[in-house]
Amino acid sequence: MNLSSLSFFSNLRIDNRQFAVIGLGRFGQAVCLTLNELGYEVLAVDRDERKVNQILTEKVAAHAVRLDTTEPAALKESGIFDFDTVIVGIGNYLAESIITTLNLKEGGVNYIIAKSSSEIHMKLLRKVGADRVVFPEREMGIELARSLTKPRILDRFELDEHHAIVEAIVPEKFHGKTLLELELRAKYGVNVIAISQDNEFEINPDPRQRLQKGSAMVVVGSKKDIDRLPL
């Protein structure tokens, strides 16, 4: 069960078919490429003509334009205010990122996702109207630390700031015991929503079924509670 591809893209509204991505660095290009491969129509935007031409040459997005997004009139003329979702991938230019996000919010964009490069940047983006802020470098660091300290966790999907779904190897401590016997909800505050059986996952498993060491289970709960599991 692969959860990693859900972490960013599952938070995009499923009824949207058009997205605008502003800022064509590595993050913005990756978002454009993935959305394009998923069948969505993407407008890629950057003030650097070289990056815009690269996107068009490599066919990473359906459309790409050179634009100064700190100018509200330029945004309006481009039609970006009509997009339901706009991703601001400008991470290294604080003023440009904040002004662009503010312009989009004042222009009536329904849902704005913005990339931050620091904690202060994140707070400022939220204050000017970003609906969701992502901090890729910090998130990657957190995932690396978790993979080192919790090697039995195979995959993780962040539901929100405080909750997650994880796929983990059943620990030796749980071997041969049923979900009823383990009382994971009472003891740890988590729920097991699937367990592996003959290389396939059984959703909503029978609580009387015994867990096998080395097989996998999918658990949902708060991050603090999940971290208390003996994995």
Image: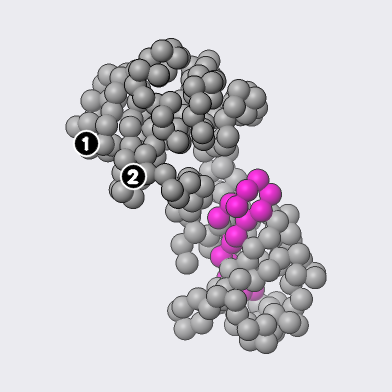
Tell me which residue sits at (39%, 26%) in the image: 80
For marks 1 and 2, the one nearer the N-term is 2
111 is within the stretch colored magenta: no
* Residue in the foreground of this view, choosing between 173 and 188: 188
Image x and y of residue 230, in percent: 70, 67
From the viewer's perspective, is residue 219 above or below residue 11? below
Tell me which residue sits at (22%, 31%) in the image: 56
* Residue in the foreground of this view, choosing between 37 and 80: 80
160 is within the stretch colored magenta: yes
Q: Determine which of the numbered discs, if any, sits on residue 40 in the image.
A: 2
Q: Is residue 160 visible?
A: yes
Task: Report which residue position mark 1 lands on.
Answer: 58
Judge from the rendering whether residue 89 lies leftward or rightward of residue 66; answer left or right.
Answer: right
* Residue in the foreground of this view, choosing between 47 and 71: 71
Image x and y of residue 66, in percent: 30, 19
Which SS type dominates the magenta stretch?
A: strand
Find numbered disc 2 in the image and state the secondary structure of the residue it sits on. Answer: loop
What is the CA distance from the residue labelled 1 to the residue labelled 2? 16 Å
- Where, by quadrant of the figure, is residue 52 drawn? top left
Tell me which residue sits at (45%, 36%) in the image: 84
Q: Which residues are magenta?
A: 157-171
Q: Residue furthest left?
A: 57
Judge from the rendering whether residue 20 lies leftward or rightward of residue 13; answer left or right.
Answer: left
From the viewer's perspective, is residue 184 above or below residue 147? below
Q: How many marks?
A: 2
Q: Is residue 47 visible?
A: no
Q: What amino acid type is highlighted by mark number 1? A: Glu
Image x and y of residue 147, in percent: 57, 55
- Where, by quadrant of the figure, is residue 50 drawn? top left
